[in-house]
Every structure is written in structure tokens, then in C-alpha cells.
Amino acid sequence: MAAPGPAELAAAAEAIAAAGVRRTPLVRARALSRELGREVRFKLECVQRTGSFKVRGAVAAVATVPEDVTVVTASAGNHGLGVAFACARLGRAAEILVPRSTDPAKVDALEAYGGAISVRVVDGTYDDTETAAREVAAAPGRRFVSSYNDAQVVAGQSTVAAESLEQWPEAEAVVVPVGGGGLLAGVALACAGRGVAAWGVEPVRSPAMAVALREGAISRIAEEEPTAAQGLVGNLDADSLTFPLVRDHAAGVLLASEDEILDAVARVHADQGIVVEPSAAAAIPRLGDVGASRIVCVLTGANVSGDVHREIVATRGRR
């Protein structure tokens, strides 16, 4: 699968604008800036349509699907919401499969689309869900759209960094959470040639990209321990285009522990009054390790149930 080039990046930006995807705010992270002695700004994809940056890549990909083809995808929630929004906006049908561990708030939001958007909950891991989705997509008249391993999706995610650098041209680094690497790959492409470093942060409990970078090749990791950062869970496809893009264009991938990620969720709420899901806060613990003075940190989504968020805030507080 070929990496997206300048033409694909431009087409994705046009499709996203035409579909009404938001240009999200970039705001100063007051407490973090003081603590780290650096200027940190949050890119608020948590206020994006569907509550997540994933809508960018989904719109860019769905815009290339013929009207008579049904889009099929596997998702831990946010990509599925992006696909549902894109299909509803662009007049496509969709079949969205999610693992049973998906936050109920995301499942409810998906099912609310109704109409030509169907949702199926799958028992097992995220990898089991993707296997099932690919089997569905093998039928005629269907196309599988990966949450990350798709050139159009990567092109769509690049617009997060492109916007951030338009809003703050002095930025020296953009730091993002990493699951399959679609966001980091797109951000790295957008940062290339601008003297801006693209960094990713993964959960210790699901370090697929970090392991691939360390070993020089994609290999399977065990999904033994659950993580609250559900949107970052899973293995990389053996042919994933995100791995070579991250390897060749990103500055690196760091790891954050479960405690650090949950503490970051509570901290963002206490310091900024912002609700984010655990996956969205994963980059925060490593901002002091990226070696830059002016840092964009992408808060990728806000699709967490109220009960779950309240429990995190109540139990973590300002530790």
C-alpha cells in the first residue's frame, strides 16, 4: 500500500472541509506549561464532531468509496463514530463492528445513527473484531476501511498537525497518542520538512508500535492486560503502512503507564475543565521527554461515559 503523497493530503483536506469537520481550537495548557517550564498547547480534538479526531480520516476515506458500496469497519468506538458520521453525511451505508469492551457511551452513540448504519458487538479482543469485520467485507459490494492502515485515513489525520502549525507556526513538536499509528503517521507527514518533531505515546499495556520500532519489524504482541486506553489497543497489520511512515518520519514512540494515563485524565479536568477519555490523555505523561520548548499535545477524544470519567476524577484527583 502506497503512502499518501501531497495530492492525497490536499484532497483529504478538501473532503474534510466540505463535510463540515471542525477546525478545532489550540489552547494553552496553563499548569503544564508552568510545571515543565515550556510552552504547551492542547489541540482540542475532544470537541471535534463525533467527539474525536477519527472523523478526519474517516471522511477522507469514505469520500473515495462509490455510493453503491457499503463501508465495513472494526472500531473500539471513535473510528466507528467517524465512519458513521461520514457515511451519513456522504450518503453511504456502513456496517460497524465493535468489541464488547467498547465504552457503552460509544456504542450508544453509534446505534443512535440508525438508518443505513448498522452496529454489531463482537465477543473477544479488538483483533477478533477486526478479523470478523474483514470477513464481512469480503462479500461483494463492500469495502473495509481500516482505522489506521489506509492511505486516505492517514491523509485525513495529517490535517490535525497541518491545522496546529497554521495556528501556531512556532511549534517545535507535535505529540499524539498512538494505537495503530494512523494519527502519528499523518502528523509526521505534515511535520516533515518543517523542522517540527512528531512524537507518539503508547500505553505500556499495548506497545505494538514501540515494539515494532525496537525490533525493526512488525510482530504480534500479547493482549494480556486490559488498559483503560481502549482506543489504543491492538496489533498492527502485518502490511501496515503506518509502521514505515512512523519509522522514517517520526521522532519516536514513548510509553506511558496505566497510572500515568489515568492521572492525566484527572489532571486535564482539574487544570483545564476539559473532559477527555483515557486514550486521549496518553501523550500527556511524556511531554517533558520530547526535548522541545514549544509543544502541541493533541487531546484526541472525549467519548467516555460520565460514570467512568467521574470515577477516574474522584479516585485520581491531583495525585
Image: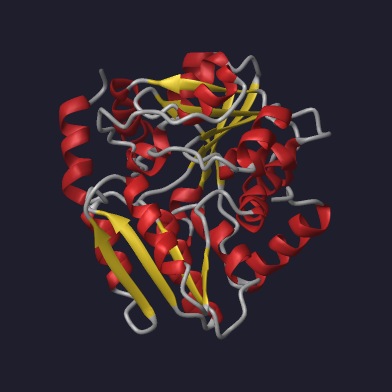
Answer with left or right where residue 17 lies relative to residue 131.
right
What is the x, y in percent for residue 45?
50, 49
Q: Can the viewer see residue 280?
A: yes
Residue 209 in the image: above or below residue 274: above
Residue 233 in the image: above or below residue 79: above
What is the x, y in percent for residue 283?
47, 29
Report the number of numbered marks.
0
Residue 198 in the image: above or below residue 89: above
What is the x, y in percent for residue 58?
54, 62
Identify the residue shown where x is 64% and y is 14%: 291
Closer to the camera, 280 or 189? Answer: 189
Q: Which quarter of the figure is the C terminus placed in?
A: top left
Identify the residue shown where x is 40% and y is 61%: 133
Closer to the camera, 132 or 32? Answer: 132
Answer with left or right where residue 234 lies relative to residue 144.
left
Answer with left or right where residue 167 lies relative to residue 230.
right
Answer with left or right where residue 132 lies relative to residue 123.
right
Q: Can the viewer see residue 197?
A: no
Identify the residue shown where x is 16% and y is 32%: 314
Identify the residue shown where x is 64% and y is 56%: 156
Say how the picture is coloured.
secondary structure
What is the x, y in percent for residue 25?
56, 49
Closer to the camera, 197 or 6? Answer: 6
